Image (cartoon, rainbow, N blue to C red):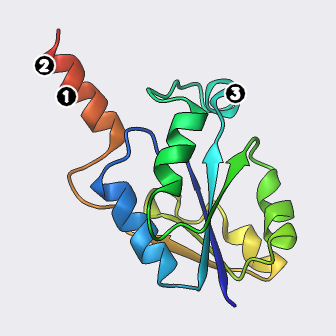
Amino acid sequence: MKRVITYGTFDLLHYGHINLLRKAKKYGDYLIVALSTDAFNWEAKHKRSYFSYEQRKMLVESVRYVDLVIPEENWEQKISDLHEYHIDTFVMGDDWKGKFDFLKEEGADVIYLPRTPQVSTTQIKQNLSNIFS
């Protein structure tokens, strides 16, 4: 069985997220999503999610391409996740291109997928803010 992992916040789940998950699943039989916790989002990324970790987890778990959701609690856990979950392929959006190439040394293929054009959580939040301000 080929195992794939991807990481992200997946706040305000939208078709760009679904597109990424659908494409990631094509690289293996089992897709794991490491979902950023609220604490990690705030302390490391300096952003707040609209939905809580538990709400986002429930949403991501409901996507048919996803087999398992685990918490992402720090930047450093990627190497241990690769080994603990026996990952073959690490997938991220191409806005992270080159940042995780070091995972190849851990035995994983590293793939950066193109972002879905004209959609992002940041843009959705800005559009909603403009509408309601």
* 3 sits left or right of 128 in the view: right
* 121 sits left or right of 6 in the view: left
Whole-Å distance between the Cαs marked 1 and 3?
A: 26 Å
Task: Identify the amino acid type marked 1.
Answer: Asn
Q: Vertically, is 43 above or below 84?
A: above
In the rendered image, which residue does mark 2 sit on?
131
Task: Identify the amino acid type marked 3.
Answer: Ala
Q: Residue at x 46, y 56 (%)?
A: 62
Residue 25 at x, y = what percent? 50, 77
Q: Which residue is drawn at 63% across and 29% down?
A: 38
In the rendered image, which residue does mark 3 sit on?
39
Q: In what quadrant of the picture does the C terminus appear?
A: top left
Q: Vertically, is 130 above or below 57?
A: above
Q: Which residue is drawn at 66% across and 36% down?
A: 37
Task: Identify the amino acid type marked 2.
Answer: Ile
Could you tell which of marks 1 and 3 lies nearer the N-terminus? 3
Q: In what quadrant of the picture does the N terminus appear?
A: bottom right
Tell me if I can see residue 9 in this picture: no
In the rendered image, which residue does mark 1 sit on?
127
Query: CB atoms at circles 3 and 2 under 8 Å apart?
Result: no
Q: Vertically, is 93 above or below 132?
A: below
- Viewer-proximal residue among 126 and 57: 57
Could you tell which of marks 3 and 2 lies nearer the N-terminus? 3
Neighbours of disc 2 within 10 Å: few (<14), some (14-19), many (20+): few
- Viewer-proximal residue among 92 and 72: 72
Residue 28 at x, y = what percent? 58, 85
Q: Residue 94: which quarter of the image?
A: bottom left
Whole-Å distance between the Cαs marked 3 and 2?
A: 29 Å
